[in-house]
Amino acid sequence: MSLPAEAEEEDPLGRAVGAALCPARFDSAALADLRSVLGLDYDALDQQRPVAQAGGLYKRNWFTYCDPEETPAAFDSIVQAWDTASSRLGDEAVCVTVGVAGNSAYILDVFRARLETTDLLLAVQNQYAAYVPRSFHIEDASNGTSVIQMLKRAARRPILAVAPHTGGKVSHANANLPSVEGGRVIFVRGAYLAAFEAELLAFPNGAHADQVDALNIALTHIFGRLSQRASSHDGSGRNATLEKVGINVAQDQPWTPPEPKPESSAVKPTPFRRPPSKTRPITQTK
């Protein structure tokens, strides 16, 4: 019998998902601290789910890490990407928040939960309020299509609707593997990390791939834009040769209405907090 420190689906003791095994010794807060310190080892030691370190598409020795206080003082931009999987299929909606500095992408946080459309809309607004990204990307599929339509009607957000990758999940991941293997994708240590690493290392044979999908939506945008700038004549992302024939490669700017609308009082942002020893906020250049 497997008794994980935090209850999972079909728990043999009948606990609710996430409930601590022995809260008198290790409550949910203590387990969250352990998860942030141990990373993937938390799954093996505390959740009774060891993951092969050299299996699947991603390799653990490719992963690059830093502590929150080691992140840049300011990011060039902050990007959020959503995979809004259907809760009817048992999948989770996932938001990956990434800070971009130079040629590197820092994974700041990963939010995930099983949500219906109404709750998903509120979660999108909360995650936006927590980080105020320069752009955020929602996969135009399943619940995401409804959320995109509602946000464009009711909110002022830099939304980019993203079509599902035509080559499938594995093809999409393969396109971004060089950036992960080359150390350009940096995992900022935090409570999200253990589950995030476990899903990456199990992909494409794991039960779920929602975090992998959201990650690759973000990386495709980030490194696609960086490559575009590098290949342009003046570093602006514009290509004079293509523009002469009517193709402007620098126009994929996010949709954003001219006048911002005040936040709804129902939205309660949950700001990112650095460790007590470090108080500088996450910022991005204007």
Image: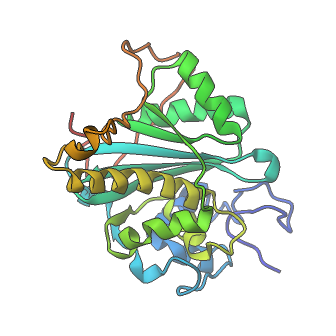
Q: Residue furthest left?
A: 234
Note whether 249 is above or below 14 in the view shown: above
- What residue is at 85 percent from the left and 65 percent from the top? 13
User: How far across and down, in percent of the image, does residue 281 sit?
Assistant: 27, 41
Answer with the quarter of the image where residue 47 lies. bottom right
Can residue 277 be seen in the rendering of this structure? no
User: How far across and down, in percent of the image, does residue 176 sit?
Assistant: 44, 66
Pick whichever, 24 or 283, lies toward us. 283
Residue 61 is left or right of residue 173, and the answer is left
- What residue is at 71 percent from the left and 33 percent from the top? 117
Quarter the C terminus occupies:
top left
Pick whichever, 207 or 152, lies toward us. 152
Residue 219 is left or right of residue 235, and the answer is right
- What residue is at 86 percent from the left and 68 percent from the top? 12
Note whether 76 is above or below 194 in the view shown: above
Can residue 223 be seen in the rendering of this structure? yes
Pick whichever, 47 or 200, lies toward us. 200
Residue 87 is left or right of residue 280, and the answer is right
User: How far across and down, in percent of the image, does residue 138 sit?
Assistant: 55, 40
